[in-house]
Amino acid sequence: MHDKTLTELAASLAAGEFTSRELTEHLLGRIQRHDGELNSFITVTPEQALAAADAADAARTRGEAGPLTGLPVAIKDLFCTDGVLTTAGSKMLANFVAPYDASVVERLKAAGTVSLGKANLDEFAMGSSNENSAFGAVKNPWDTSAVPGGSSGGSAAAVAAGLAPAAMGTDTGGSIRQPAAFCGITGLKPTYGRVSRWGIIAYASSLDQAGPMARTADDCALLLNAIAGHDPRDSTCVARGVPDYREELNAPLAGLKIGLPREYFGDGLDPEVERAVREAVAVYESLGAKVREVSLPHTHYAIPAYYVIAPAEASSNLSRYDGVRFGHRCENPSDLIDLYKRSRAEGFGEEVKRRILIGTHTLSEGFFDAYYKKAQQVRRLIRQDFLDAFEEVDVLMGPASPTPAFDLGAQKDPVSMYLQDIYTIAVNLAGIPGISVPAGFVGKRPVGLQILGTHFAEQRLLNVAHQFQQATDWHLRRPQLVEESA
């Protein structure tokens, strides 16, 4: 059962091959046996999962089952989940039990899914390797000496290892697409505003976006159907109709215009990653697509602009963690200032502190215009680069990351770690959608092909990704952990 895709599991449940309870018990057993090595979950919720599975089976018996009824998922521990520990991977929230469901969780529950638990992540979603979690690093199922990517590394590892058929992640600068690439799964970052952010613990409010992570583009389309749509509780959520994202999956690609940004194939790109990406593009040419080179001239400004804007927003969002109302509180503070200082010093990890300090500096008097305002101006230029490119082509393609998954502990310099997101960050600055699909290997470590579209082009991206997966078998490859029978 654990080797099936989400859509295959849905068909099996509908055919009565097994029940949701049997499926859930099987996956909970796998989590118990294997997650001690991977550390992909922070909290596992067997009682709630089995209760939800029983409710799903009862709904199916009554003839009330929907497309997702009874299907298990993992939820990144950044989504508030009613009555369940919601930590954001931080000591600051190590004992926080959310009193409500995030909008995405609410919609998944309404669709009849079964939550297996909360997946590990870089603290407050700040990281590219899942080594920044207060609950320990996550390991890559393909090679446990390697990172799974971040910040949604726990979600990616759980899917790749066959512990969950799908998971929810968030993407602020590549945090769905990069771990999807490192773990050999499919990960979709929707257009900013396509999915509600209400109830997601905030990192950078103008960049954060929730999205699905699963084995295939078809699975991601199935999940996006459930979570997309307007939410009046989120002022940044767009009031726009939601199409059926599975409807156009099988549309032919003849005449598709693909752009290859020359800035994505320069210095710093691993030659073996480039080889895999170019071979994937050749598959599209065989399917009738036309390929041309395009330029995104402001790409090299994306990382410096992001690391001004995102820390600035983080410093504002994380100011609420003061040791007074909720979160970690230091012992026996001598006064209010001591309470603030020690609670934050003890509760936040090093990377979170680093970004808060950067953000506070860039927003301070005398530096706001020089840094934050200038970064927002650069952001507009980056967005315009994408809009100009999409006047010429339908989609853009390139690597999701400059290298395959690197070794645990290998990236000790923060700036080197930031450069891992060089191909993903601009997408968040522009607010456009992107998807990473498995496209090969370097040794035994997966490579991801990133496909980008203009705003609200998720249906086209899913179609393009699905057709590639119909023509290749990279998404069918499984790490040894999955290939076992139990």
Image (tube, grey):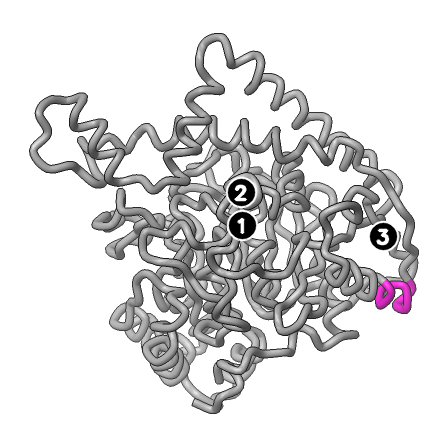
Side of 38 where 7 appears, left or right:
right
How many numbered marks are there? 3
On the rendered image, what quadrant is the C terminus found in?
Answer: bottom left
First in sequence: mark 2 vs mark 3: 2
Label at residue 175? 1
Where residue 215 appears, as percent x and y from the top left, is 59, 70
Magenta residue check for 18? no
Instruction: State the residue position of label 2.
Output: 172
Identify which residue is drawn at 44% across, 14% down.
364
Write down the residue under mark 3: 258
* Near-viewer residue (241 or 251): 251
Which amino acid type corresponds to the residue marked 1 in the rendered image? Ser
Boundaries of the magenta span:
282-288
Q: Residue at x 68, y 68 (%)?
A: 442
Task: Kindly identify the amino acid type of the residue bearing the numbered disc 2.
Answer: Thr
Query: Considering the numbered disc 2 on the image, is that residue within a helix, a strand or a loop?
Result: loop
Q: Main secondary structure of the magenta part?
A: helix
